[in-house]
Amino acid sequence: IGALSAHLAGQCVGDNWDKRLDNFAPNAIAGQPEKIREWAIDFMKTTARAAQLLGVKVVTCFLGSPIWAMWYSFPQTTPEMVDEGFPTLGLNFDPSHLFWQGVNPAVFLRDFADRIYHVHMKDVKINRDDRAGILGSHIEFGDTRRGWNFVSLGHGDVDFDAIIRELNQM
């Protein structure tokens, strides 16, 4: 096992609560932000203990953050604000999310090589048909009207040859 994942619980640790987080936690604590956070913290601790018992050194997750709202470009977020929010965390490199947002995954690897703790190989197919925007809107994954969709590795638009070359240089 290369890594354990705790994405949904992890999101509940640092995010400012809204009702979408209720979908990630047990039904019995829906609508109770502090109980959701307590549950999520306990879940993450249990995941870390499981990783230790299995000899796994990486736990990937969405850790949520009260600064997520600062990632949008206005009002401007300074590099110092981002550094304050993530002083010790590494990145779970996922080229599919970078690619559909117009970021070159290979260049991203070069720029953040010292922050990459895990690699999650996932592919994406872009559908630029002049009808669908690049944002997913509220259309379900898999719907061909979306501007992008996750697909099986090697069946999308991500340049995995360039990514592997970058990873080999790290």
Image (cartoon, grey):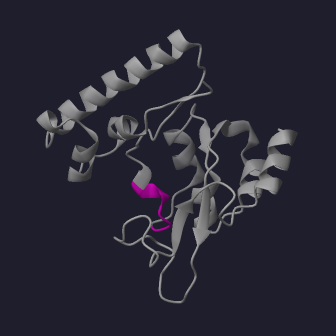
Q: Quadrant of the C terminus?
A: top right
Query: In the image, what residue occupies the spot 39% across and 25% down?
Result: 44
Could you tell me residue 57's position as x and y percent?
61, 20
Decide: is 137 above or below 30.
below
Q: Is residue 88 left or right of residue 10?
A: right
Q: Could one spot residue 101 in this view of the protein?
A: no
Q: Quadrant of residue 6?
A: top left
Q: Is residue 14 visible?
A: yes
How many marks do you count on the picture? 0
Residue farthest to the bottom, as pictured: 130
Q: 126 left or right of 14?
A: right
Does residue 85 show up magenta in the picture? no
Residue 37 pos. (x, y %): 27, 32
Left or right of 72 in this view: 17? left
Q: Residue at x 54, y 13 (%)?
A: 54
Q: Where's residue 4, x and y in %? A: 52, 28
Q: Is residue 130 above or below residue 15?
A: below
Q: Residue 108's x, y, as percent? A: 72, 54
Magenta stretch, residue numbers: 69-74
Residue lying furthest top in this view?
Answer: 53
The quarter of the picture where the N terminus appears is top right
- Judge whether 23 appears above or below 103 on screen: above
Q: In this view of the protein, which residue sits in the foreground, 10 or 96?
A: 96
Q: Is residue 109 left or right of residue 28?
A: right
Q: Nearer the viewer, residue 74 or 48?
A: 48
Q: Residue at x 15, y 38 (%)?
A: 27
Query: Quadrant of residue 28 in the image?
Result: top left
Q: Is residue 72 magenta?
A: yes
Residue depicted at 65% across the width and 64% down the height: 156
